[in-house]
Image: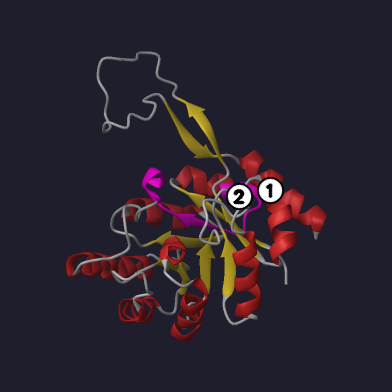
Amino acid sequence: MSMKIEICVDSVTGAIAAEHGGADRVELCDNLMEGGTTPSLGCIRLARKHLGIGLQVLIRPRGGDFLYDDYEMQVMREDIHLCKESKVDGVVIGCLTAEGEIDQARTRDLIELARPMNVTFHRAFDMCRDAKKGLEQLVALGVDRVLTSGQEASCLEGMELITALQRQADGRIIVMPGGGITPRSVSRIVAATGVNEVHLSARVSVESRMTHRNSRCFMGGTLRPPEFSWKATDVSVVRDVVERLRQSA
């Protein structure tokens, strides 16, 4: 099976950069500092208009945990409906119970609504109580792939569990490592785990072109990220990952 490279992006510009770098698909998100939330409908539609590669959209109404109330579930259902209308290829979802189990009822509900789009269960999986039990539940639910760092801070640290999950999956579900993957580590992770898909952000810092800068006020919260620079998907980083994986194939 050929290697598939998914790039996590937070803008239309980033999605186009991922395609130009040779990625197979993108996961379109917003608010990556919070682990990602659902992007705007305008962003989704414009990305679909300009992309020739696969477009996955994160369905997550807020940051924080993955225990959702009924209104948040309604928001996710509506967002999935809008993604389907916008001809998105797939959605990325994840629901847990308060006890850290896969919320099978709510996950099933979202999967049924999403079809025929493909469905990825996101890194809510890394917060579940029992990864191996959770994987079997996702297989039974018909999830297409699961995104995981191996329940660790990065895929390098989680390689042992990722490898075990890949063996357990046995072709029934795609296990896709994601979390802290860089061009330097990607080949090592693929070789060690035997996976066929990887997920990374491939971002670099971008400096604002503003010449006038008011340093007395700030537009964000108390965390205060830099006001005049941000992270953006970089074509050369994506291309570097693609070339490294081709060389190691």
Q: Is residue 75 left or right of residue 149?
A: left
* Residue 87 visible in the snapshot: no
Q: Position of residue 132 (x, y in %)?
A: 52, 76
Q: Position of residue 112 (x, y in %)?
A: 36, 82
Is residue 74 located in the magenta-colored stretch of the structure?
no
Q: What residue do we see at 63% from left, 53% from top?
A: 156
Q: What residue do we see at 53% from left, 72% from top?
A: 145
Q: Is residue 62 left or right of residue 158?
A: left
Q: Amino acid at mark 2?
A: Ile
Give above or below for 20 relative to 81.
above
- Name the image quarter holding the N terminus: bottom right
Q: Is residue 70 left or right of residue 191?
A: left
The part of the chain drawn in magenta is 18-35
**Element at label 1:** helix
How many callouts does the rendering have? 2
Q: Nearer the viewer, residue 42 or 90?
A: 90
Q: Given contact means CB atoms under 8 Å apart, are the residues at marks 2 and 1 in contact?
A: yes
Is residue 30 located in the magenta-colored stretch of the structure?
yes
Q: Amino acid at mark 1?
A: Ser
- Residue 121 lies in quadrant: bottom left
- Name the image quarter holding the C terminus: bottom right
Q: Position of residue 228 (x, y in %)?
A: 40, 24
Residue at label 2? Answer: 181
- Residue 214 lies in quadrant: top left
Q: Nearer the viewer, residue 20 or 139?
A: 139
Residue at label 1? Answer: 185
- Residue 122 lies in quadrant: bottom left
Q: Position of residue 246 (x, y in %)?
A: 78, 55
